[in-house]
């Protein structure tokens, strides 16, 4: 979702600033993965926590530790060199700025974002008086507020186009859900739990850094459910919140694994690149650094949590 929404807004700007299209797509793909893991909502962490009856409480700072350094590194690696070289077309940028000045910007354009922030934080800050609407209703109300801000558009056409783009993703997620349920029913998940608990320490960390992202080729959420829970059970001696946050980061890398590679495919579509493997090639180094950072966080989970308030 982040790739098709925020990514579609960022991509033209970066390309006009001189960032190559494939690097722009790679930066968007990595940013979408880190955004999925960053607080306040992290579904893979919720799934992992649900496997051991651990409530989704206290994850905000650990998730920031897992994502902020990597986001900065990826931006410096993929975007900054092109910006520093000044490869953008200055005349084209000036024309774009003049075009933007023709449409006056008002604070009303921020209404959907502000409303969404209020709805999301209200449930957490004032739980006794604020109604628990749920995330779908929050986003729906914020979307409806967009009808009275900015340019006018055809609501029915926009909704139809959005649904057409979402149906392929929904189909993939439905198939993945069926696959995971069948694996659970026939005992594969239990077999994985026992096998992971029997691994030696050095092999467990290696398997963690490779198997979770690779299984994420089926689904990042599936990797969190099938592999994230066993690894968390095997690491109960370390801070569970920090370990769960790092495991969710590894699960998020599954969105870069072919053949599904949802983040890479959609990022390539945003910039008009037909071969998404060209995008994944630039994602390789950030993905490797992400996996190493996740393992480092797990190894030092107790120490890192000691520094957090």
Image (cartoon, grey):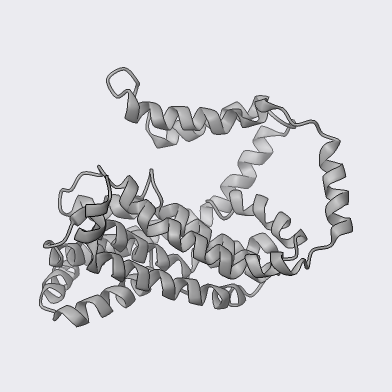
Residue at 25% over, 63% down? 228
What is the x, y in percent for residue 269? 64, 63
Q: Is residue 59 left or right of residue 264?
A: left
Left or right of residue 14: residue 220: left
Number of numbered callouts drawn: 0
Residue located at (67% from left, 57% from top): 11
Of residues 111 and 142, the one drawn nearer to the viewer in this rendering: 111
Asked which quadrant contains residue 246, the reply is: bottom left
Q: Is residue 160 above or below residue 215?
A: above
- On the question of residue 184 being in view, the answer is yes
Where residue 241 sits in the image (x, y, percent)? 23, 53
Residue 49: x, y in percent? 22, 52
Q: Is residue 307 left or right of residue 105?
A: left
Residue at x 32%, y 59% (from the top left corner)? 248
Residue 273 visible, this orientation: no
Q: Position of residue 75 (x, y in %)?
A: 56, 63
In this view of the protein, which residue sits in the foreground, 205 or 72? Answer: 72
Residue located 40% across and 31% down the image: 121
Q: Is residue 143 left or right of residue 90?
A: left
* Image quadrant containing the C terminus: top left
Corner quadrant of residue 225: bottom left
- Outermost residue toward the top in this view: 129
Q: Nearer the viewer, residue 66 or 279?
A: 66
């Amino acid at each position: 979702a982040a790739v098709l929404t925020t990514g579609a807004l960022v991509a033209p700007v970066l390309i006009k600033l001189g960032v190559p299209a494939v690097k722009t797509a790679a930066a968007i793909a990595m940013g979408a993965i880190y955004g999925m893991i960053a607080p306040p909502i992290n579904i893979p962490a919720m799934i992992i926590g649900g496997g051991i009856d651990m409530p989704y409480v206290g994850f905000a700072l650990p998730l920031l530790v897992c994502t902020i350094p990597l986001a900065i590194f990826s931006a410096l690696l993929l975007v900054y060199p092109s910006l520093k070289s000044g490869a953008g077309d200055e005349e084209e940028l000036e024309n774009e700025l003049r075009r933007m000045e023709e449409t006056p910007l008002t604070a009303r354009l921020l209404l959907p974002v502000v409303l969404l922030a209020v709805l999301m934080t209200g449930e957490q800050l004032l739980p006794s008086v604020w109604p628990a609407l749920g995330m779908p209703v929050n986003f729906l109300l914020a979307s409806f507020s967009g009808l009275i801000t900015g340019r006018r558009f055809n609501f029915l056409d926009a909704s139809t186009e959005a649904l057409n783009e979402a149906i392929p993703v929904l189909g993939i997620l439905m198939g993945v859900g069926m696959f995971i349920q069948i694996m659970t029913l026939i005992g594969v998940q239990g077999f994985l739990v026992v096998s992971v608990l029997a691994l030696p320490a050095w092999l467990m960390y290696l398997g963690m850094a490779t198997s979770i992202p690779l299984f994420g080729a089926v689904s990042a959420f599936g990797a969190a459910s099938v592999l994230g829970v066993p690894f968390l059970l095997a690491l109960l001696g370390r801070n569970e919140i920090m370990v769960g946050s790092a495991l969710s980061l590894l699960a998020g890398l599954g969105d870069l694994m072919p053949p599904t590679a949802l983040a890479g495919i959609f990022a390539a579509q945003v910039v008009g690149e037909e071969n998404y493997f060209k995008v994944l090639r630039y994602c390789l180094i950030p993905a490797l650094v992400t996996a190493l950072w996740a393992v480092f966080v797990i190894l030092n989970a107790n120490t890192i949590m000691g520094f957090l308030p």
